[in-house]
Image (spheres, rainbow, N blue to C red):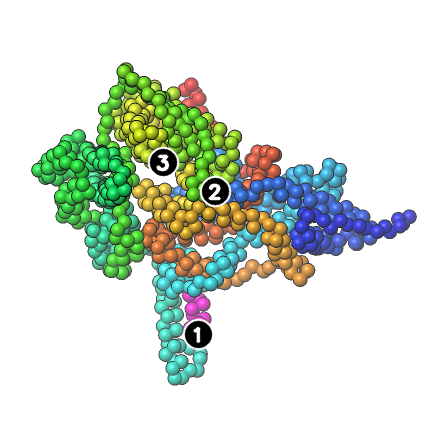
Amino acid sequence: MKREARTIKIDRRLTGANIIDEPLQQVIQFSLRDYVQYWYYTLSDDESFLLEIRQTLQNALIQFATRSKEIDWQPYFTTRIVDDFGTHLRVFRKAQQKITEKDDQVKGTAEDLVDTFFEVEVEMEKDVCRDLVCTSPKDEEGFLRDLCEVLLYLLLPPGDFQNKIMRYFVREILARGILLPLINQLSDPDYINQYIIWMIRDSNCNYEAFMNIIKLSDNIGELEAVRDKAAEELQYLRSLDTAGDDINTIKNQINSLLFVKKVCDSRIQRLQSGKEINTVKLAANFGKLCTVPLDSILVDNVALQFFMDYMQQTGGQAHLFFWMTVEGYRVTAQQQLEVLSSRQKDGKHQTNQTKGLLRAAAVGIYEQYLSEKASPRVTVDDYLVAKLADTLNHEDPTPEIFDDIQRKVYELMLRDERFYPSFRQNALYVRMLAELDMLKDPSFRGSDDGDGESFNGSPTGSINLSLDDLSNVSSDDSVQLHAYISDTGVCNDHGKTYALYAITVHRRSLNSEEMWKTYRRYSDFHDFHMRITEQFENLSSILKLPGKKTFNNMDRDFLEKRKKDLNAYLQMDTFVNPLRNSMRNVSNAVKSLPDSFAEGMTKMSDNMGKMSERLGQDIRQSFFKVPPLIPKTDSDPEHCRVSAQLDDTVDDNIPLRVMLLLMDEVFDLKERNQWLRRNIKNLLQQLIRATYGDTINRKIVDHVDWMTSPEQVADLVKRFRDAFWPNGILAETVPCRDKAIRMRTRVAGKTKLLSIMPDELKHIIGAETTRKGILRVFEMFQHNQLNRRMVYVFLEGFLESLFPQYKFRELFNRLHSRSKQMQKYKQKLQTTQAPSLQKR
């Protein structure tokens, strides 16, 4: 019996936006035509089956579109993706370090790097490893099938999902027809390299950058591809029949190509022989190094960090820190006195308070570096120290009060064989020249930051002294101080909205009792917290400051929760009491911290200045008696996800957070001294605020809204359609490009990236560090398995954001549970924990 043909009606509405629905319908039509119809019509001409499949796909897309509209995508695009990329880069960097540490003489293969990468991933993630999905095609297909089945369960009506035949067809179309080809393309290193070149197509390739890439390349395939292309071009140029002016141009081109070919041959021969030359060591042993004057080193960010490291090695850091602190003191004192002078002209009198602050800072410098209690002590003539002490006792401090001693310290660093003269013979000096790009150029290029910039102390400032600069303060155990946040509010200052916390302070002594209120922003708590944890890194495991929330942070419920968390942070006596009898020398330094925390608190009356000063002294005596030595926790910051260690309280500023995170991971700034990182953070803050002001967050939010707008989504769907079905025809499998072409594309991509790096960045963090960071990121993209891992991480984050009410994180852990690296890690944990369990 033959059933009568019936009219098929299809509702073409999917997302509610016609500009998206039209290309989506075409994708569905092309998918059914090329993956189902071509074999189905050989079995039957009944189109009801095709209609059911189409309707099932449309139901899934409708549910998907509905869910997408309900989600706030700003946290995903501004936080989750950045964190995942930073974590991926950190895992790659740690894997490279492990390969280097295994054997400095034998270069690890790409397979070794991939295996080590997933070893580091499981150490960092703890509960998941994606090695099977990224290295085994069979396991990858199984993972995608399972994932698509879960998505169909969430998106389809129960009746459609229970239809196994229909479900399996849709699952295979999604997994093997759409997701797998898309992942293959996005993870292809050659595709990424071409995309990088396309993105920066407007910049011209720099000859110097190209030659640097050739000289630094450790890939023989790249060098052979460039050499062969140079030989091909030489053959073509020599075959030309030219005369007149053209002959000179041709000769110049031939000479350039001959030079490139010679460099490639020399580099290949060196790599094949295994006699790799470290240019820094070669320059240190045999090269004629240019001289960088000490005064130039002291005002250049890059040079100063190397001299600082050397002085710490030789025990002369007190001299350098003293010189830097005095520089910061002088600048700050001049500014404070100028402000005081202008206020006096306006009839305002705050002379005693300002001079008191300057005196406290000057005494702090004296006590830390010059007094008999100083350890280590700056060695200068006793009569100069006595003269300074007499001046501090009988006169008001001036900006020039330390000038005589500072000149003596400078002469000591310049002349003493232990310091600058020996530094010029040290490997750190050669590394400094490499960072300054001066191993071949004898002319010194100073910092672009300007001569007037000071380093603001040692290393955190003059009036806001570092912990090492703070003088010991006697404590009075009879004084008790109790502070808590009593209320919260939202303030608007010149268009900028922020939360304000009212702190009620009770101070009790034997003879008196006082109470007052002061007002602080969250950033004040953060600044205080950072000064503790920067000086005593181990304390970060005990002192837990509640994190910052970028969006919806003015909500009343959120402010109440923040108030509760900050109150818990203030009541540190609950865990400090058992530890009060630890080493006093560091404890006193920590107790000095709240001086700066108390400074600048909002004055509620004419006496609030004195109250704030007493508040700083009293908090010293009761709150922060924290032990100097605390056992290091098992969680090494370098073996955690970026989001776990990210300083998300750095500023209420999305671009600053993103830029600082990426600079940390790309250029490995956490391995450098904290002084450099602080200067970079301050520079980024000034740059962003000067460029955009307080509107940049709004611009980013608007950009995310634009990215998720119907017009942009429609454009992405059209690009997907045109990539897989150009002109409506299924694209043929793109043949793998010739190896030589792919190698030359790699060289071109690296050259482009180095060419667009601004000179200002090299002046901030160093030319060598900049090159290494850029090339590390590029090298990370040259491994298909690692690119797949990054794509899957982004996909997992997307689905977790799309379905927050479901436990997708647990699902992914189960799907990746068969990982070999995960099983090894668990066995290792059991082995290491067994002895401790037996002892118990």
Q: Residues within 10 Å of mark 3 (few under 14, many from 20)?
A: some
From mark 3 to mark 2, how far is it between C-alphas?
23 Å
Q: Amino acid at mark 2?
A: Asp
Q: Amino acid at mark 3?
A: Asp
Q: Residue at x 39, y 84 (%)?
A: 244
Q: For this view, does 294 lie left or right of residue 696?
A: left
Q: Which residues are magenta?
A: 227-237
Q: Secondary structure at mark 1?
A: helix
Marks 2,1: beta carbons within 8 A: no
Q: Between tags 2 and 1, which lies in front?
A: 2
Q: Where is residue 367 drawn, in percent x and y?
A: 19, 33
From mark 2 to mark 1, how far is it between C-alphas?
50 Å
Q: Which residue is mark 1?
A: 235
Q: Which residue appears farthest toward the bottom when viewing the image?
A: 244
Q: Amino acid at mark 1?
A: Gln
Residue 83's tag is 2
Residue 527's tag is 3
Q: Is residue 364 above or below residue 184?
A: above
First reached walking from the N terminus: tag 3 or tag 2: 2
